[in-house]
Image (spheres, grey):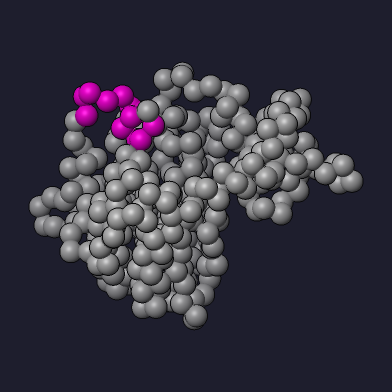
């Protein structure tokens, strides 16, 4: 679910939203969960979870394991994920660019996409000497406590970001309490510099820096981010040594996204050669203004709040 679905318009079908909440509980293909565990993770009544898991099992999205009296991800869900990632050309190019930066900096470099109050690693790069972070494809990170999440929320149109924060306050007050006092400063810093930092929020040992990018395919923001050991990279060093290569990475990935026709997740990309390098980007850092500020402030009168973040 993207931020625009949380805008308070009242048009979200709750049973569909809750079904996806149940599926999100199964973070790994091998995860096995019972109704009580799912209920605790989702915050939904056990009776509601029981009806949802029964329906999802009938659909093949889940499989019931009688011996364990638990569920695991079913073949239909696996097939859906496989079909969404068949087109690997763009993903491979993005992974190469992430790895190039990872070879320069001893951290984990990620390309993440939004999913409600979290972001999910879509691709990552990591040097052999990387320390501290070991995220992989599919890993989920919280918006409220990570540089990637702070960059994403700061890049959203103000009304969309505020709606997301209000919904977070209802469902995860502790996360919202962490994010709210930093949101406006993050917006201002992002407009001026083109990136956001978050130090010691997710872990006192990890500092992060992130650059949001506009995805023309999905009309929402995605993020390139890096996590580094705070003992090696304090905030001053992030600004001094990490910001520039990450902004350059943002330019490169932004160019790849902008040059790709069709769906970043589908095999339609395989039919069009993609640029191997980037010379311009949707996000730039300049003295007076930047493209990010223009995107986050431009009027979109003909589109609803939902449409502004890519949901139609």
* Main secondary structure of the magenta stretch: loop
Measuring from the top left, give residue 71's x and y in whole percent.
Answer: 76, 42
Q: Check the picture and name the quadrant holding the C terminus.
A: top left
Q: How far from the left and from the top, in percent, is residue 47?
A: 76, 25
Q: Is residue 184 left or right of residue 121?
A: left
**Residue plotted at (43% across, 55% down):** 87
- The answer to which quarter of the image holds residue 174 is top right
- Residue at the image point whose x is 48% and y is 42% from the top: 115
Residue found at x 25% / y 57%: 255
User: Is 304 colored magenta in this rendering?
Assistant: yes
Considering depth in this image, is 39 or 154 the residue closer to the camera?
39
Where is residue 9 drawn, in percent x and y? 41, 20
Relative vertical location of residue 166 with respect to residue 111 in this rendering, above or below: above
Q: Which portion, as a residue range, is magenta?
A: 300-311
Q: Residue reaching furthest front?
A: 271
Q: Is residue 114 visible?
A: yes
Q: Position of residue 131 (x, y in %)?
A: 51, 75
User: Which of these two is toward me, 90 or 190?
Assistant: 90
Q: Mark yes or no: residue 196 visible.
A: no
Residue 285 within the segment the image draws in magenta:
no
Residue extending farthest top: 10
Q: Is residue 255 above or below residue 114?
A: below
Left-right relation of 223 to 140: left
């Amino acid at each position: 679910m993207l931020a625009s679905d949380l805008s308070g318009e009242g048009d979200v079908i709750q049973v569909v939203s809750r079904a996806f909440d149940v599926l999100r509980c199964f973070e790994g293909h091998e995860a096995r969960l019972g109704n009580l565990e799912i209920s605790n993770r989702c915050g939904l009544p056990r009776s509601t979870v029981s009806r949802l898991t029964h329906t999802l099992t009938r659909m093949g999205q889940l499989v019931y394991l009688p011996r364990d009296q638990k569920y695991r991800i079913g073949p239909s869900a696996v097939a859906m994920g496989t079909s969404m990632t068949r087109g690997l050309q763009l993903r491979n190019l993005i992974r190469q660019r992430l790895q190039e930066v990872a070879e320069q900096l001893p951290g984990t470099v990620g390309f993440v996409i939004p999913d409600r109050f979290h972001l999910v690693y879509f691709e990552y790069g990591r040097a052999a000497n990387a320390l501290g972070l070991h995220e992989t494809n599919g890993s989920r990170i919280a918006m409220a406590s990570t540089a990637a999440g702070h960059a994403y929320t700061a890049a959203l149109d103000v009304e969309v970001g505020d709606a997301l924060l209000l919904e977070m306050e209802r469902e995860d007050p502790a996360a919202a309490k962490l994010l709210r006092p930093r949101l406006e400063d993050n917006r201002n810093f992002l407009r001026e510099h083109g990136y956001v930092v978050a130090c010691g929020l997710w872990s006192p040992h990890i500092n992060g820096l992130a650059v949001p990018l506009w995805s023309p395919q999905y009309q929402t923001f995605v993020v390139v981010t890096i996590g580094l050991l705070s003992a090696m990279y304090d905030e001053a060093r992030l600004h001094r040594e990490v910001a520039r290569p990450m902004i350059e990475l943002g330019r490169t990935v932004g160019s790849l996204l902008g040059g790709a026709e069709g769906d970043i997740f589908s095999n339609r990309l395989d039919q069009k050669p993609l640029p191997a390098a980037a010379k311009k980007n949707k996000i730039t850092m300049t003295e007076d203004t930047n493209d990010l500020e223009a995107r986050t402030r431009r009027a979109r009168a003909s589109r609803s709040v939902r449409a502004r973040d890519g949901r139609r």
